[in-house]
Amino acid sequence: MPKLKPGTIVPDPAEDKRIHTGIAADPDTCDLATVQPQHLKRVGRPKNPAPKVQVTIRYDSDILEAFQASGPGWQTRMNSALRDWLETHRS
């Protein structure tokens, strides 16, 4: 048996049996050892078709300070400013 942290409450055998009986009776219980992964439903945020790319870049300090001074969301606003620039400068 693994070493337990102090204060951990361990059920006695009778209570443990009641817990496992309740789990077995629950229709929503799923034994992951018997389920094929392709049948499991993916949860969480859907994959972004155009994910962001992390890069390291250097900006002049006054440019960076101006965007950061505008508060939370400054990176999104910087991204929008660069996108606007692209729209007016594409050949």
Image: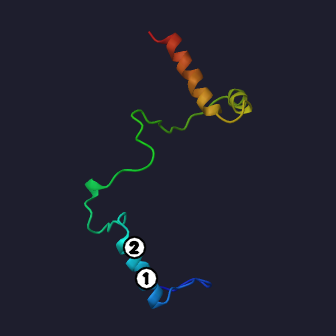
Tell which residue pokes out farthest to the bottom in this image. 13
Q: Secondary structure at mark 1?
A: helix
Identify the image quadrant of residue 84: top right
Mark 2 touching mark 1, by CB under 8 A? no
Quadrant of the snapshot with the C terminus: top left
| Front-most of residues 89 and 30 | 30
Q: Is residue 15 above or below residue 82?
A: below
- What mark, if any, has residue 37 been given in the picture? none
Q: Earlier in the sequence, mark 2 or mark 1?
A: 1
Amino acid type, label 1: Arg
Horizontal side of residue 61 vs 36, given as left or right: right
| Front-most of residues 63 and 28 | 28
Identify the residue position indicated by label 2 in the image: 23
For label 2, the crowd category at 10 Å Cα-Cα, with few meaning under 14, some 14 to 19 and many 20 or more, is few
Q: Which residue is located at x 27 percent, y 63 percent? A: 35
Q: Which residue is located at x 57 percent, y 84 percent? A: 9
Quadrant of the snapshot with the N terminus: bottom left
Identify the residue position indicated by label 1 in the image: 18
Q: CA distance from mark 2 to mark 1?
A: 9 Å
Q: Position of residue 86 (x, y in %)?
A: 51, 17
Identify the image quadrant of residue 36: bottom left
Amino acid type, label 2: Ile
Q: Which residue is located at x 45 percent, y 89 percent? A: 14
Q: Is residue 39 above or below residue 51?
A: below
Q: Which residue is located at x 41 percent, y 42 percent? A: 46
Q: Secondary structure at mark 2?
A: helix
Q: How many marks?
A: 2
